[in-house]
Image (spheres, grey):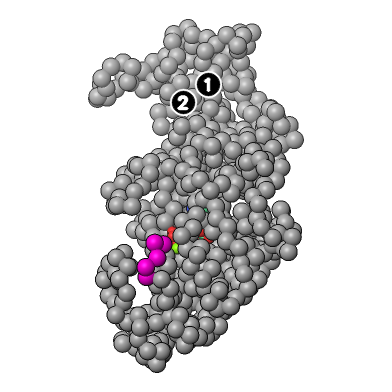
Amino acid sequence: TRPAKEAADEGGSYDIGLPDTEKGVVTRFPPEPSGYLHIGHAKAALLNDYFAHKKYNGKMIVRFDDTNPSKEKQEFQDSILKDCELLGVKPDQVTYTSDYFQDLYERAVQMIKDGHAYADDTPQEQLQEERRNRIESQHRNDSVADNLAHFEEMKKGTEEGKRWFIRAKLDMASNNGALRDPVIYRCNPEPHHRTGSTWKIYPTYDFACPVVDSVEGITHALRTTEYNDRDPQYQWFIKILGLRHVHNWNFSRMNFIRTFLSKRKLTKVVAEGKVWGWDDPRMPTVRGIRRRGMTIPALQEFIVKQGPSKNINMMDWTAFWATNKKYIDPIAKRYTVVVAKDKVTCTVAGAPEAPRTEEKDVHAKNTDLGKKKVVYSKTIILDQEDARSFGEDEEITLMNWGNAIVRKKKYSLNPLNLVKSEVDKPVTELELELHLQGDVKKTSKKVTWLSTEQELVPVTMYDFDYLITKDKLEDDDVLENVLNEKTEFKTEALADCNVAELKEDDIVQFDRKGFFRIDKAFKHGESAVAFQIPTGKKM
Ligand code: ATP
Ligand code: MG
Ligand code: MG
């Protein structure tokens, strides 16, 4: 068999050797409604969708793993469903672990009665210590009656009940830590966003997952490789409870450099106002990367191409944005902007006396995209940086117009201007003379320009940097210490009159400035807002 990635690169399909697929395939994506979907979740969702719907003609369930009321909210649940839709992931069914609370409770009671579970109140730190050293809890061999009594107390959510939890009685001597009597039920009197105050006890993921997978008819439980050690535990629950068999199949977690995907950390930067919200363009959430200008087909291509490899992958954003560029380059309409600060107003000798407007293709290589207005006139504006670079009598090219010769260039004469040298002074006056017979291939400077004889549209352009300064976060890194101080860069600019028509979400190219996504349309004299889209070059 060929490597899956190779097959996918050729547009073929993966064969990852899932067993028993001829008996039908039902997969599931089990997000906890405790945050917005991030790019790692997108991988899990798209892979489950791929195997269920594209590869095996099966079924896929989105199941909310809503077993911790302290972290979960309706807002997150709603956003996750919307984001799945956005990703093109269409679940055949949406279910909730909370729909199985009664069932799970009854099974836990049965496990206690059968001697497969017990109540414990060992303090957290001691518990960890004991599990590490394979020491049995003093409650491990308590009577069934005692255990049931404690579980009932937990169920009532009393102060006494809150001290206790239920553990599976598995194998404290195992070399596999996941088998050393994992916790299966906890007491939490906080109200749940779906079941309200009906329950004060909640199953852990370790317990709920195998039970609900089996009951719901999941055939293949795809999980990230850090669950490898837990597979025997999962299978033990299936066996002890006499449940229908489910295959475990693991794929690697996806990580990106200078990016954190932990919901705890993401929640923190949102709560502390380090970003504008979960959909901030600096966030690695599905909404954030979309707002930054990632397109869904590119995201799908990128993730499905990574495929179900089991190697931990630390991705570079370069390849991610390069994939996107393939999709946006052919469809991004082209416009022109000039940086507002220190812009140079310039006269063009030989330009038409009266301003002239022409209809031009908005994308030279994709004429289907229509036309835009280009205004030619005697007065134009240029970027300061360009104007400053011109030599006296140098022949330059005004893009999409023709060549011109620099006839006069004057710097600011303001004596109060505390500048180090002539070079640092802003150019304040410039005269060009059109030289349309000149060869545009022979000039070294091709500059963007805008006629002032049109309604110039103010645009605030943003560029962003990574939220953190380290390539890879280690477990002991404190987020505060690695947060990047400045991650937002703002440039005020003026754009050609056509930009007034752009709508939110449009993806465009500003000549020589790059690709941008319009985050806010120009309206009532308020600047349009445009976010720079990375293209895979070093950012
Ligand atoms: P966190 O630990 O930050 O809360 P989580 O992985 O526990 O994140 P869930 O909502 O439980 O968050 O995840 C839903 C599904 O997405 C799980 O099946 C999980 O394995 C998968 N998943 C989460 N992060 C990644 C990732 N970085 N790469 C691939 N799959 C992931
Ligand atoms: Mg989690
Ligand atoms: Mg989880």
- The prevailing secondary structure element of the residues shown in magenta is loop
Q: Circle 2 sits in a helix, a strand or a loop, which is it? A: loop
Q: Circle 1 sits in a helix, a strand or a loop, which is it? A: strand
Q: How many marks?
A: 2
Instruction: Report if residue 164 is visible in the image.
Output: no
Which quarter of the rendered image does ligand 2 occupy? Answer: bottom left
Would you name the residue on which mark 2 appears? 383
Residue 447 bears which disc, if any?
1
Inter-mark Cα distance, 1 to 2: 8 Å
| Left or right: 161, with 505 as reference point | left
Q: Residue at x 43, y 76 (%)?
A: 168
Q: Residue at x 50, y 36 (%)?
A: 318
Report which quarter residue 97 is drawn in: bottom right
Residue in the foreground of this view, choosing between 450 and 191 = 191
Residue in the foreground of this view, choosing between 1 and 514 = 1
Stretch in magenta: 172-176
Q: Residue 111's x, y, as percent? A: 48, 82
Of labels 1 and 2, earlier in sequence is 2
Q: Residue 438's x, y, as percent? A: 61, 8
Q: Residue 253's x, y, as percent? A: 49, 51
| Left or right: 342, with 77 as reference point | left
Q: Residue 375's x, y, as percent? A: 62, 28
**Is residue 380 within the magenta segment?**
no
Amino acid at pointer 1: Val
| Left or right: 128, with 293 as reference point | left
Report which quarter residue 212 is drawn in: bottom right
Instruction: Report if residue 30 is visible in the image.
Output: yes
Q: Are marks 1 and 2 in contact (CB under 8 Å)?
A: yes
